[in-house]
Image (cartoon, grey):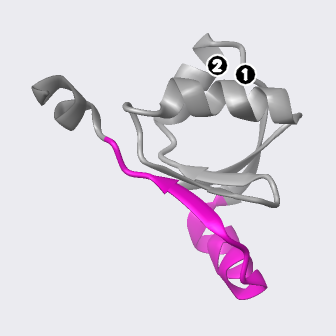
Amino acid sequence: MIIIRFADEGSKRKALGQLAGWFSFKSWASGEMMLPKEALALLAEEEIRVAVEGRATGVLPKLQRAGENAVSADRRLDHHLSH
């Protein structure tokens, strides 16, 4: 898992629409998003610009200590295809 940040709110909204149903992710109000590194290929294909903040193991504890609210999506492709 990695932490990314979007260039702007429009990019973040577009990414949320593309990622939902395909990858699990967690998004913070501060703008960071945690997702599998494999999701970067999808974002690149859709020309959604992001900045990689680092591995979740290094950045996640800082976000958790800050006490920020997070929005999670845990929808996987296999679950999506089975319905």
Classify mark 1: residues with Cα within 10 Å, few (<14), some (14-19) or many (20+): some
Residue drawn at x 72%, y 83% is: 67
- Up the image or down, 56 lies above or below 83; here it is below
Q: Which of the 4 image quarters holds residue 75?
A: top left
Residue 50 location in percent, x, y?
77, 34
Residue drawn at x 69%, y 57% is: 54
Residue beneath label 2, please? 44
Is disc 2 placed on a helix, strand or loop?
Answer: helix
Q: CA distance from mark 1 to mark 2?
A: 6 Å
Residue drawn at x 71%, y 14% is: 47
Residue 23 in view (yes/no): yes
Q: Write down the region rendered in magenta.
A: 55-75
Nearer to us: label 1 or label 2: 1
Residue beneath label 1, please? 48
Is residue 71 one of those drawn in magenta? yes
Q: Confirm or deny contact between disc 1 and disc 2 (CB under 8 A).
A: yes
Q: Is residue 36 left or right of residue 78?
A: right
Q: Is residue 52 left or right of residue 7?
A: left
Is residue 68 one of those drawn in magenta? yes
Q: Amino acid at mark 1?
A: Ile
Q: Is residue 53 left or right of residue 9?
A: left
- Up the image or down, 27 lies above or below 62; here it is above
Q: Is residue 4 left or right of residue 55?
A: right
Which residue occupies the extreme front position in the image?
A: 83
Residue drawn at x 38%, y 31% is: 22
Q: Amino acid at mark 2?
A: Ala
Is disc 1 placed on a helix, strand or loop?
Answer: loop
Classify mark 2: residues with Cα within 10 Å, few (<14), some (14-19) or many (20+): few
Residue 14 location in percent, x, y?
68, 24
